[in-house]
């Protein structure tokens, strides 16, 4: 009888255990689906996970063709080659490395040929094709986001545009100006090529970034407090557009997770020796804070205008200051949307309220800088933050006039020029000058200690166009193409600092880093305007000249010491430092003594 009772009890336990395991086993057996920009990609070979190394393998051809890249297969060498406007990728079955732009890139797992499909690690696909990657373990789906064709073409995807849809200063927040002497996409602006998963995305291939730690603080020179490390500012841009740096898309609607992610980001950056963050609080006429003028950012909840349930800006400022670091509020002033659709914009977004202010150009929407009321509305929105929050600075990137399409402002030119300028270029520069002057005066009138600075494209003008310009061959320039007369801003004292995006190496012939630092140092000399340099760690490991060794960044920092005018350095972007390409984070930690 005892045996029978024991047997019955054991049977019940086994049945219960099987019932509990069955759903999980069924989920694990379910094929993994791939979605590109919310469109499911059909493939005769499903992605799969290599259990022992926890790596996800995906079909390269299916994804490449999904983003419009050309794909070629060599039966003889068992090699697949993918080509788009930015780069060429070649992978051979069985190989433990691939080539990107002619440079060998090691793979976390060897290339596999499964039923005629070349399968490669998911992380490699994200990083090399400039895709944001999100994994949903419950649904077993991989969501790939192309960010409208370029998270700043390798800042702007190697195009020559400066007003794109991505996330880096100058590139956009990814968009960016064209590379000097471009034409082959060999050196683009920040953003477009540095995809991959966003921090905390918890991918099955280990892409999520672990929190770090650190104890270096410091404040911006001239702010009234004592900065660390000999007075130098050491910062990073934090892009929120497309959830590039923070918050991660999986954190939508979860304030606690967003706060934890930001804490980890700060700890990681401070652990590298940085003492300041430049956080994008306005990317497309929206806000990362409760505003009476503009809607909530969709990058907090997935829906523009939806309250995230807390004040992210207040939280970020408090956490940054708690660590002795500086918080600079980064605004994209004139970009209204990263595409031309207004269907998903909130009712109080500028493109809905004032469609007459909006110009479509290069696949995006912009607020027309030539309309005085439009400029004032942007200033009012920025001043709302200055008045209500304890920020250390107001920061603008180079989104003024876009360079990647025709900008239709003839009507505004006729209405608001009043015969003052004989050509539209001078009128456009005056529009931006008026905006910069009035914003600077407004900030300093209300809070004199708050610093106001701008991060223009790295080349003001080429010497070929102006004998006082730099000895460069840039495809676009700040003055001629973005209508940003940075020299006038500096000499007039409208800004406290200038932070040119010098996103090229010491060996890039068309726009050498040292040549441009020399030029900018001379521009600010004796003006009282501080000079910070914008660096591009996102380019490390790419085929562009000079970026095959992380010491390129350290050599740039060392070169800056030759110029007392250089008061600090800022890196685009946080995610690229945290990924530690070629060991750059370790080198910075050692260089700054963190």
Image (cartoon, rainbow, N blue to C red):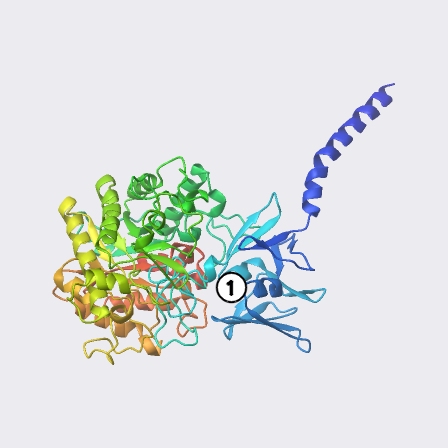
Question: How many numbered marks are there?
Answer: 1
Nearer to us in this view, 363 or 260: 363
Q: Quadrant of the N terminus?
A: top right
45 relative to 83 in the view: left or right = right
Vertical position of residue 384 compared to residue 502: above or below: above
**Splitting the image into 4 quarters, where does residue 42 fall?**
bottom right
Horizontal and vertical percent for residue 331?
30, 52
Residue 332 visible in the displayed image: no
**Most extreme residue toward the bottom, as rendered?**
464
Nearer to us in this view, 46 or 297: 297
Q: Residues within 10 Å of mark 1 (few under 14, many from 20)?
A: many
At x 44%, y 47%, the residue is 344
Nearer to us in this view, 126 or 8: 126
147 relative to 9 in the view: left or right = left
Horizontal and vertical percent for residue 326?
27, 48
Secondary structure state at the residue bearing disc 1: helix
Residue 164 visible in the displayed image: yes
Vertical position of residue 355 compared to residue 384: above or below: below
Q: Which residue position holds label 1? A: 129
């Amino acid at each position: 009888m005892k045996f029978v009772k024991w047997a019955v009890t054991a049977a019940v336990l086994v049945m219960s255990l099987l019932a509990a395991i069955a759903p999980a086993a069924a989920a694990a057996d379910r094929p993994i689906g791939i979605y590109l920009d919310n469109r499911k990609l059909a493939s005769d070979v499903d992605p799969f996970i290599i259990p022992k190394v926890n790596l996800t393998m995906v079909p390269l051809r299916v994804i490449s063709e999904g983003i419009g890249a050309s794909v070629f297969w060599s039966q003889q060498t068992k090699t697949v080659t993918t080509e788009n406007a930015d780069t060429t990728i070649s992978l051979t079955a069985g190989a433990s490395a691939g080539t990107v732009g002619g440079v060998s890139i090691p793979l976390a797992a060897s290339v596999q040929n499964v039923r005629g499909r070349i399968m490669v690690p998911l992380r490699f696909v994200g990083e090399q094709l400039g895709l944001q990657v999100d994994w949903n373990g419950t649904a077993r789906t991989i969501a790939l986001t192309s960010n409208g064709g370029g998270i700043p073409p390798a800042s702007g995807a190697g195009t020559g545009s400066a007003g794109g849809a991505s996330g880096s200063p100058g590139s956009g927040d990814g968009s960016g100006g064209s590379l000097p002497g471009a034409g082959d996409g060999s050196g683009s602006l920040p953003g477009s090529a540095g995809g991959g998963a966003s921090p905390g995305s918890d991918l099955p291939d280990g892409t999520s970034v672990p929190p770090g730690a650190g104890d270096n603080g410091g404040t911006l020179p001239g702010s009234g407090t004592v900065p660390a490390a000999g007075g130098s500012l050491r910062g990073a841009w934090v892009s929120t557009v497309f959830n590039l740096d923070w918050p991660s898309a999986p954190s939508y609607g979860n304030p606690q997770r967003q706060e934890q992610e930001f804490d980890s980001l700060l700890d990681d950056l401070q652990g590298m020796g940085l003492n300041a963050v430049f956080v994008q609080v306005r990317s497309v006429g929206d806000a990362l804070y409760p505003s009476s003028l503009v809607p909530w950012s969709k990058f907090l909840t997935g829906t523009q205008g939806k309250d995230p349930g807390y004040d992210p800006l207040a939280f970020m400022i408090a956490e940054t200051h708690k660590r002795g670091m500086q918080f600079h509020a980064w605004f994209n002033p004139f970009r209204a949307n990263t595409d031309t659709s207004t269907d998903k914009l909130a009712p109080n977004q500028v493109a809905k309220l004032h469609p007459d202010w909006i110009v479509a150009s290069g696949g995006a929407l912009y607020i027309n800088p030539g309309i005085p009321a439009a400029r004032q509305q942007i200033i009012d929105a920025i001043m709302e933050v200055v008045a209500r929050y304890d920020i250390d600075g107001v920061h603008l990137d180079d989104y003024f006039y876009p360079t990647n399409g025709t900008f239709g402002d003839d009507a505004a030119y006729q209405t608001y020029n009043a015969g003052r300028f004989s050509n539209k270029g001078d009128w456009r520069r005056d529009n931006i000058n008026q905006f910069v002057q009035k914003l600077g005066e407004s900030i300093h009138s209300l809070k004199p200690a708050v610093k106001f600075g701008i991060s223009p494209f790295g080349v003001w003008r080429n010497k070929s166009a102006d004998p006082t310009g730099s000895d460069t061959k840039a495809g676009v320039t700040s003055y001629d193409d973005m209508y940003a007369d940075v020299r006038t801003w500096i000499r007039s004292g409208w800004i406290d600092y200038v932070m040119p995006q010098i996103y090229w190496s010491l060996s890039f012939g068309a726009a050498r880093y040292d040549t441009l630092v020399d030029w900018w140092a001379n521009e600010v000399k004796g003006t009282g305007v501080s000079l910070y340099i914008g660096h591009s760690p996102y380019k490390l490991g790419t085929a562009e000249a000079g970026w095959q060794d992380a010491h390129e960044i350290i050599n740039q920092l060392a070169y800056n010491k030759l110029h007392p005018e250089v008061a600090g350095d800022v890196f685009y972007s946080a995610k690229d430092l945290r990924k530690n390409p070629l060991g750059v984070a370790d080198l910075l930690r050692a260089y700054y003594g963190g």
